[in-house]
Structures are given as structure tokens and as C-alpha cells.
Image (cartoon, helix red, strand yellow):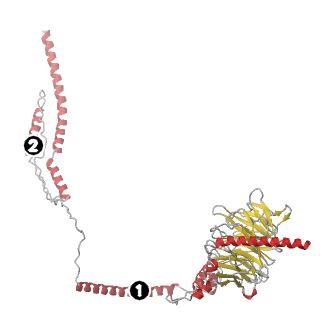
Amino acid sequence: MADRLDRKATLEAKKKRLAQIRAEKQKKLPRKEDEKVAVTVSSNLDQKRKDADNLLLSLGLDDTKTVVAPVAEQRTQSKKIEGQQESLTEGATYRPRQTKAKSLDISQVICVTSIPPKETVTYTKETQTIVQQQDSEDEFEALEQAAKDEALAETRKVAETGDSDEEETKQELDQVTRELSEDEKHVIETSDGFQSFFTRSSKFIERALHHPIDIFTEYDTQVEESSEIDKSMKLTMNRVFSDERWSKRRMVTSLDWSTHHPELSMAAYGNSEEAVYDPEGVVLVWNSKYKTTVPEHRFHCQSSVTASCFAKFHPNLVIGGTYSGQIVVWDNRSSRRTAQRSKLSTAAHTHPVYCIDIVGSQNAHNLMSISNDGKVCSWSLDMLSQPLEAFEMQHKQAKSVAVMCMSFQHNNVNNFAVGSEDGSVYTACRHGSKTGISEHFEGHTGPVSGIDFNKSTSQMDFSHVLLTSSLDWTIKLWSIKDSQKTYLHSFEDRNDCVYDVAWSPVHPALFASVDCGGNLDVWNINSDVEEPIVSAKLPAHLSANKLRWNGNGSQIMVGDSVGGVYLYDLGEQIASPRPDDWNRFVRSMNEIRNMHQEEKEARIVTSQQSHY
């Protein structure tokens, strides 16, 4: 009996457990139906196909059509599955069997396109140029006439438009422009900008007006040979440089030619007793290319300019030595005031500077200056506050040399020679064991006014040959290699003080000299040592005190005592050296030495006979 009750209790417990399981299953069944509905909705292929067709139509593929098999059977199968699932939910002991849905595939796709077939390009080995058919003459004439008519109509249209524009512009200008008052004109004329513009423009206009142009030159006519020969053997005056205000009554103290612009020359002037309120020192830069009457540049200084030169390696700088002992540097790009100025101190010059020169190369060069008390200074153009080096030239450690002129050997920055007031010639060096005077030469009886080393080095080196001029009316020829320390020859043609002498820069035996009588003499040692080959005389019997050759040796510039600068042209046959002139000069120098030795021996014999 007890076993039966136990079995009954066990069955009741199992029934409750089954009822609980069924309740839990019923709670889970609605979720599965929702998922199936979602899957069914998501498998709507018709809508997807319509969307694909619309997309193809929007891309322009209107001829493409896609045919897919119907899917009605698939829809009925899905409905049957849903009904079975609903009926199975009522039974708690049976789990519904789900049938696997078939995958949807495209049964057949048909595409119709309108793509053109690929074009095959072929060529043959022939000319590929497109041949154009030539128009007939009648068609060409018709086209030409039509083009002319069109151009004429366009021109008329432009002319009418231009006339109307001109009238409108003129009316606008009449409304805008007005006449300036006298005060406004004066303000404009006195302004710095207008003055600078007017000065610069007037130079260009004057060059154009004074430049000679012969429009009647006939190149087919025969030139007289005799006139050409005479011209090539002459020394003729080209022109005169003078300024009524700035150079009149001023003595020319220095001359130089520009190495960067060969047509530009420079003249330095001393003070004028008449121009009391003007600066004492003036430097004018002249242009020999154009027949202008005004200088290219004008520089002033409060002290008389006693020496000047162009800076060889700075095209815009002009350097001057003054009577007060200062070194000044002007820049033609700035105003007329001095750009730099050395200080007046015992470390530099305190006496008049009569000699300046640029020595060295492009990368290493210095300005050398010598004052009248024999002090030599070396400067850097970038800094004039104090000299780089300085020493005094003294002879025999006691006698100071009063220097009048200086000349450096060609292509030598160490050795130079000076002429003094006592008529002596000294050679000196800047560096070495014995800085200062090295040799002493005697021969002149008056102050040495000019000195110059031979500059011709084309074939042979004659840089040891030296010329000096003096107030004793003579020009003397020297060789610093001569052990006798005396002159080789004395040129004594003139009976006036010789103020300057200079070698030709290209001819080994050619040199020029000027004297107090206004004579410009050109000498050729190869031709004659007694008389000059050509001569010229300054007008109005003025004194010629300075001369300078140009770079190619074809022109000589001469300065007088009243502010005039004269430009002379030297004939080509005289100025240009021949190939054998160097060898001839060697023979001439040997003849001069022999002649000098004979004269010396004759003087010795004469002196001995006078003793007896």
C-alpha cells in the first residue's frame, strides 16, 4: 500500500514538471516566429530586382534586361512551414521539425549591350601627311578680298572707338588737370628728386646732341692714301675738357684713366684764388666718347687735391690725396661729399700727399701713399681710420727724403722708386730685411718732377728701365740694375722745366714728356735719342704740367696750369709697336750704354789732362 502511494506521488511530481517545461516552451515560441518573419521579409527578391533595374536605368544601360525564374513555389513552401510551426506549438511533447529553406539562385541572365567593336589601326610605310586640296585661283582671290574687307571694317571700327575714347580722355584730363601756381612750380624745381632727374636726363640729351654722325658718308669713294699716311704719323688734338666754374683758374695736379670704363678720365684740381666760397679741392670725371661739355661726375673736398686715381678693382670709387695730408674716397653712386676720410694724426700723413697708387691683385690689394716728408702708408679701402702699415724713408738714417713723385715696378707690389726735391732718385721696398730706401742714384741738379718705370712686358721684361724728368730741363734714362748708380742717357732737347714724363703702356721704346713751355713731345728711343719724333704745343702758350697715357697707348691727356685738360690722338704708326721693336730696344739700350761708357772714359781722360 505504501509502495502505491509513493508511486502516485512520483507521477504527480513528473506531471508538474512537464507542465512547467511546456510553459517555458510556449514562452520561447513567439520569439522564433518573429525571427522567421524577419527572414521572410528580408528575402524579398522582387523588390531587390526592381531596385537593380532602376539602378541600371540611371546608369544609361536601357537595353539590358534580366529575366529570373518565378518564386511563387518558394512563397507557398514558406507559408506551409509557418502553419506547421503554429500547429506544433499546441503539442508540448513534440518538437517541431523545421525544413531547410532552399537557396535562391539566378536561373538565367540575358545581357544586351551596344558597345562598338574594337577598331584595329593599321599603317603603311608611306607619308602620313594629310593632303589638302588647293583652292582654285578664283576661290583664293575671293577669300583674299573678303579678308581685306573684314580688316578694313575692323580698322574703321577701331578708329571710331579710338576717337570716342580720345574725346572722353581729353574731357577727363581737362576736368582733372589745372595750372600750377608759381610757388608750387618753385617747390618742384628746387626739390632733390627733380634736380637729380634733370641732371641725369640732361647728360643723356647732351650726349645725343653732341655725338657727331655723318649721314653723307659714301663707302664707294676712293680714300686718298696720302692723307691717311699723314694722319697716322701725326699728333693731333681731339678736344679740350674745361668747366667755367669748377676748373677755371685751377691748376691740374693729377690725371688718370679708368680701367673699367676706358672712355672715362679724371682730373684733380687745386684751389682757386678767385672762387673764395667754393671748395678748395675739386675732382672732375670727363667722358671722351661723347662730345659733352659738362663732366660726368664732380667731387669736392675742403683741402686741395694734390693726387688722385681711380680704384682699379672698385669701378665706383675715386681716391684722392690732399694738401692737408688726408686720404679721401668718393663714391659716384652717392652724393658729392666724401664717402670716407682718413684722420689727421701722427700715425698717418701730416704733410701734403703728392703720390698715391693701387697695387696688388683683385683679391689682395692696397692703397699706397707717400707724403712730402717721406712717410709711406699702406691703406685698406674698407677702413681709412688708420693705415695698415707705415714707415719713413730716410737716407743714411738721418736725412729724410722730401718725395715729389713715385712709381711702382710693373706687376711688383714691393719695389718702387721715388724722386726727391734734391734731385736724387731712390729705390725702396715695402717688405724684407731692409724696409725703406735700398739704393741711391744721383744725376739731376734740380727737383725731380716725374718718374716712371717701363710698363711694356709683352715679349721681354724691361721693368728695370726708369725715366725721370726734372726742373733742370732734362729727362734722364736709368737702369736700376746698373752697378754704377748713374743715368744712362740724358735727353736735353728742350730749354724749359720738364714737369712730367711717362712710358707708353704698349710700346717698349715710346715715351712722352711735357714742359713749362706747353710742349708735348713723343720720343722713340729706337728711332732717335736726340729729338722727339712728333710734338704738339698747347694753345695760348700755357704751361703743361701733367700727362697720362690711356690704356691702349693711342691717346695722351695733358693738363695745364689754368684748369684745361687736352686730349691728343696719336697716329697708329707711332703708337702701335712692331714685332721687332723689343729686339731693337735691346740693341738701342746696349748702344746707349756703350756711348755712356765712352763719354765717362773721355771725361776721366780730360780731368787727368787738366791736372797736368
Q: Nearer the viewer, residue 155 or 569?
A: 569
Eyeballing the image, is 106 above or below 243?
A: above
For the N terminus, the quadrant is top left
Q: Which residue is mark 2?
A: 74
Eyeballing the image, is 68 above or below 196?
A: above
Residue at figure coordinates x 17%, y 41% from the top left? 39
Q: Which residue is mark 1?
A: 162
In x, y percent, where is residue 86? 11, 35
Kindly report which numbered mark, 1 or 2, lies closer to the viewer in this rendering. 1
In x, y percent, where is residue 124? 20, 64
Kindly indicate the quadrant of the structure image that contains residue 556.
bottom right
Q: For the view shown, which residue lies furthest in the right direction?
A: 612
Q: Nearer the viewer, residue 77 or 279?
A: 279
Q: Amino acid at mark 1?
A: Gly
How crowded is the residue under tag 1: few (<14 C-alpha within 10 Å), some, or many (20+)?
A: few
Residue 507 shows up from this direction: yes
Eyeballing the image, is 35 above or below 5?
A: below
Q: For the view shown, which residue lies furthest in the top direction?
A: 1
